[in-house]
Image: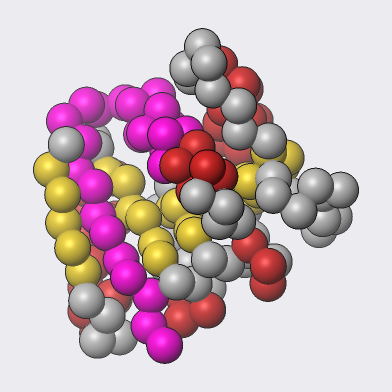
Amino acid sequence: MLPKVNFYILSSQSEQGRHTFACKLAEKAFRLGFKCYLLVDNLEQAERLDRLLWTFRANSFVPHVIYQNELPNSNNAALIGTQQAPELWRHTLINLSTKLPENIEQSEQVFELLDNDESHKQAGRERYRQYQALKIDINTHKI
């Protein structure tokens, strides 16, 4: 089965804006009981997102861990990582990386977050074409 893919086009031009929106999506997935994986390009980005998940909203709590081949003790923790999501965390994939996630057909829903940064938009256009080539339906939302 192919995943549902949603592109969110944010009006900001900052990584902080994309990361904050990703935190809101991760919080929603957590509250709905879905395992969530946040795919990033590098460990530095993972660490920034890790810190933001603790502070992005005063009353929010999203258990999470940076994934480095070791699964967390908590089954409902969101994972942040640079590699393919482990099997149980493939339901909701939030892609903050510049590449198409591996084995995309194993996820149920994918969220692609883009901002007004030209390099992010260009990488997003390329992923959009890759999803189209895979015959995946895409929804686009301007935020």
Q: Identify the magenta region.
A: 1-26
Along the line of sight, the residue nearer the viewer: 70 or 98:
70
Query: For residue 116, which quarter of the picture?
Result: top left
Query: Is residue 98 magenta-colored?
Result: no
| Residue at left offset 47%, top offset 34% | 23
Along the line of sight, the residue nearer the viewer: 65 or 131:
65
| Relative vertical location of residue 99 with respect to residue 108 in this rendering, above or below | above
Along the horizontal axis of the image, is 21 left or right of 51?
Answer: left
**The C terminus lies in which quarter of the figure?**
top left
Residue 109, image x and y in percent?
40, 65
**The N terminus lies in which quarter of the figure?**
bottom left
Along the line of sight, the residue nearer the viewer: 53 or 62:
62
Along the horizontal axis of the image, is 1 left or right of 76?
Answer: left
Residue 6, image x and y in percent?
27, 59
| Relative vertical location of residue 141 with respect to residue 143 in this rendering, above or below | below
| Residue at left offset 22%, top offset 26% | 12
Along the horizontal axis of the image, is 127 left or right of 10?
Answer: right
Residue 80, image x and y in percent?
63, 45
Query: Is residue 19 magenta-colored?
Result: yes
Q: Residue furthest left?
A: 142
Q: In this rendering, does residue 51 appear at all? A: yes
Residue 76, image x and y in percent?
69, 49
| Residue at left offset 47%, top offset 17% | 57
Query: For residue 136, which quarter of the picture?
Result: bottom left
Q: In this rendering, does residue 43 appear at all? A: no
Along the horizontal axis of the image, is 100 left or right of 78?
Answer: left
| Residue at left offset 76%, top offset 53% | 75
